[in-house]
Image (tube, helix red, strand yellow):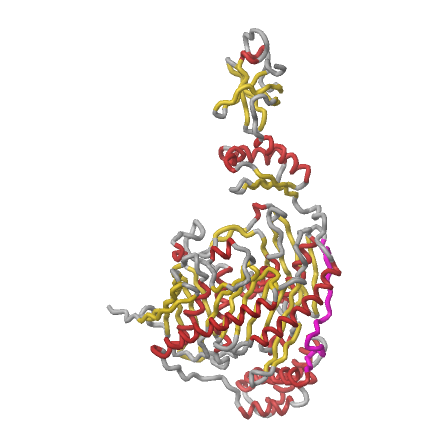
Amino acid sequence: MDLHKKQFKTEFAGKPLMMEVSRMADQADAAVLGRYGETTVLATVVMSKKDVEKDYFPLMVNYEEKFYATGRILGSRFTRREGKSSDDAVLSGRLIDRTLRPLFNQAMRREVQVVVTVLTLDHETDPDFVGLLTASTALAISSVPWGGPVAGVKVTQFADAKDFVFNPAMPDLESRKFTFDAFVAGTKERLNMIELEGDEAQESDVVTAFEKAQVEIKKLIAWQESIVKEIGKKKQDVYLALPDEQLKKQIEKFLDGRLEKAVFHPTKTEMYEHLNQLKKEMKDMLTLEGRDEKALEASDVLFEEEINDLVHEKVLKEEKRPDGRRLDEVRELHAEAGLLPRVHGSALFVRGNTQSLSVATLGAPGDQQLVENIEFTGKRRFMLHYNFPPYSVGEVGPFRGPGRREIGHGNLAHKALRALIPSQEEFPYTIRLVSEILSSNGSSSMATVCAGGLALMDAGVPLRKPAAGIAMGLMLDESGEKFKVLTDIQGPEDHHGDMDFKAAGTDSGVTAIQMDVKINGITIEMLRKTLDQARDARLHILKTITGALSAPRKELSPYAPSIISLTINPERIGELIGPGGKVINGIIEATGATSIDIEDDGRVFITAATQEIGKKALDSVQSIMKEYHVGDIVEGTVVKVLEFGAIVEFAPGHDGMIHVSELKNGFVKKVEDVVKLGDFVRAKIVKMDNGKVGLSIKQLNG
């Protein structure tokens, strides 16, 4: 069978890039095999044949990791197959989704599913780059209506260089310190998705990097357009759930003069009380006018559109926000640290109606999270978990564990704080930070950064600097040129605004950025204005944070474990562990230490409930690891009596024999005449040969 392969090749950042279209997955609307270096992904697109009864566009983007892509058998030892998506896979799926989604007509009611499957991974290439590009190509050549293509690139500035590197090799990212590492995506002219992790990066460098990235994105889109020109399918005509014009005019007339009074209130509660009442009155009016149930359902969408238009108009023409703030004004702030007893560190941060209660827990090095997925296998020493209970938005709902949103928000806050965490050499603890969102009305992820950094300082973690984050918004006119940037968005500004731009950092630079849009994208001018305004807000918030706690506490909580570290010769790790763990477990049992963790490079971490217990365990370890020499005086217990001598254990794992001739001056008939089992004796090392130690009591004074 001929698969009718068509291959399209180019090069990007010094590596071959290929898109292949064939009869593979030929029952999908479109399927493309993308390869970059030796990383290969399959992207498929399927659109349902019928419209569904929903009041939103039902798009699904799935990112599937396959263990065979790495040439290894991974997974639980009892299943050895793929199961629930890893957090990294969820984040990759969100990255692709956030880039593709704004370019669909949101009035579509056909289900569309994009599946990106990683088939091979070369561990040099970030699969997000080729995953997004292949998904975009598949959508672009399909019959599914869509406003792409799009493309995205990874752009990195390493700390030891000022230039910007596109799609750096993954080993470089692991081994070299970077100032920032970003993935930025968009259309030919505008950026519509940003993910950035930084180490106090400068806003000017970020803007310059993204300007250069836009040039590369444009080239990749032009290449895709050449593929579409050759093999692209005609786009289908699909039903769009557009409002009935007569109904629209009827609602506009009813809301005229009423809507502004309902929307513009200082608090979220007041606003929604008035909006709910107004919506009820609107539906009562429609019912009296004889409108059916379908029209009443459609009125909900039209009601939201009217709010959208009103909020845009007031911001753009009058710089008037629903709660009366200036465009660059941050809501009322509150921060406090140490509010919970017994936990190792805690903090509450409040911005308007948004509240994050963060709790820091310190643990032993052995408490690190073990991570195993196709891109990374290893340990994670700093963990940040974000919880968003339904009561935080005044709703009733089930608790089902973290979903895509919780994983995404937690990861953003994790990025914002990770660069500020001290090294394990400086602070050997494993750190877990949990953010409980108590109330949400605009950017709970950035509240998590504020509360999280404060909780870490309260726990005594020597954070390099305090951090803060803020969510920025954008209102764009119909021309796409006139715009206003809003600081600290909430409520209708978030829901009806055109951009959600989160920026976190210290007083010296940026540590994280995340951007999503509901429009085609933003220009570099919009980006620059947003970053400048976000910096001002960040510095303002930092004053409140440092007012609550200006620096990390000098002492750890009395409930935190004590950790003592030392370094031993890596070649002697086996001696410390002992056969089957006998030696190390013996120390733990004898001293009451919580755990003793040993790294391959010889670092040893002793964790105990108190410093006193830890010191006992340290003495035992040092005793075992001590380098003994001929002439040293040792003390120990007689553990075995033989015909020709006695065995003395003078340190855990160390013993030596006193020959009968070395027990005392003169003739000794029986060993028991001088020493007995259990006696405590002092002796001198007189011989060391292949690990065997000879002791002498007779030569103690010699």
Task: Please provide the residue range marked out in magenta.
Answer: 319-340
Q: Nearer the viewer, residue 158 or 87?
A: 158
Residue pushed farthest right?
A: 547
Measured along the vertical axis of the image, is residue 176 above or below residue 319?
above
Overall secondary structure of the magenta section:
loop
Q: Nearer the viewer, residue 535 or 606?
A: 535
Residue drawn at the location 59% of the way across and 71% of the way down: 501
Residue drawn at the location 38% of the way across and 56% of the way down: 68
Q: Is residue 481 left or right of residue 257?
A: left
Q: Quadrant of the C terminus?
A: top right
Name which quarter of the figure residue 450 lies in: bottom right
Residue 673, percent from left and from top? 58, 10
Residue drawn at the location 56% of the way across and 85% of the way down: 479
328 drawn magenta: yes
Name which quarter of the figure residue 210 lies in: bottom right
Name which quarter of the figure residue 246 lies in: bottom right
Measured along the vertical axis of the image, is residue 319 above or below residue 81?
below
Residue 100, percent from left and from top? 48, 73
Residue 168, percent from left and from top? 47, 61
Residue 323, percent from left and from top? 70, 78
324 drawn magenta: yes
Q: Can you see residue 387?
A: no
Q: Is residue 493 left or right of residue 1?
A: right
Q: Nearer the viewer, residue 533 or 278?
A: 533
Q: Can you see residue 29?
A: yes
Q: Is residue 291 left or right of residue 350?
A: left
**Count of numbered labels shown in the rendering:** 0
Q: Quadrant of the N terminus?
A: bottom left
